[in-house]
Amino acid sequence: MVPEIVTTRKIVDDLLLAKIEERHIHVIAKRGTPLEDLPEASLLQKTDFVPAVQQGIALGGATGLLAGLVAVALPPASAVIAGGILLATTLAGAGVGSWVSGMIGMTIGNRRIKEFEEEIEAGKLLVLADVPVNRVDEIEDRVKQHLPQIEVMRTEPKVPAFP
């Protein structure tokens, strides 16, 4: 959280000098705040679109698979087309689930930034930067040069680690 736009601009400029591409820097401010040339966060950062689509694919695919199993269990289905029915219903369920969930997710604020909403509404700016794990400490030091008291929050994508 950055208190005003001047410091935000300095932080963004410093991140750009550190060779963090502008597409990996996102600023979230109160609605109506002029960000001028600062990189404004897109819908992907402001909403729960991506997690909602992921949940929709999982739930829709599972529902489609279940519907396919029910369809195969009914008397007219033959064993020859059973695999096709299962595949088609699973894919259709995943597609519909991701679409519906994505639409719902776009209307819901990002759960990761919920805790900052009060400060954003009070006029502060939230700066998000997507950086490789091996550069987090370096970038944190650069940001702390502008705001020594700042608390940098680290998040990592929830991707399972496979050996």
Image (cartoon, rainbow, N blue to C red):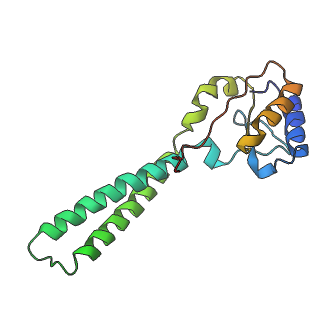
Q: Is residue 73 left or right of residue 123?
A: left
Q: Residue at x 69, y 36 (%)?
A: 31
The reply to whether residue 106 is visible in this rendering is: no
The reply to whether residue 41 is visible in this rendering is: yes
Residue extending furthest toward the front: 163
Q: Residue 5 location in percent, x, y?
A: 84, 31
Q: Residue at x 61, y 33 (%)?
A: 113
Placement of the N terminus among the 4 image quadrants = top right
Q: Which of 20 and 64 is in front in this view?
A: 20
Tell me: residue 111, above or below residue 74.
above
Quarter of the rendering containing residue 66: bottom left
Q: Residue at x 83, y 43 (%)?
A: 38
Q: Nearer the viewer, residue 163 or 120?
A: 163
Residue extending furthest toward the bottom: 80
Q: Residue at x 88, y 43 (%)?
A: 18
Q: Is residue 73 left or right of residue 121?
A: left
Q: Residue 142 location in percent, x, y?
A: 86, 32
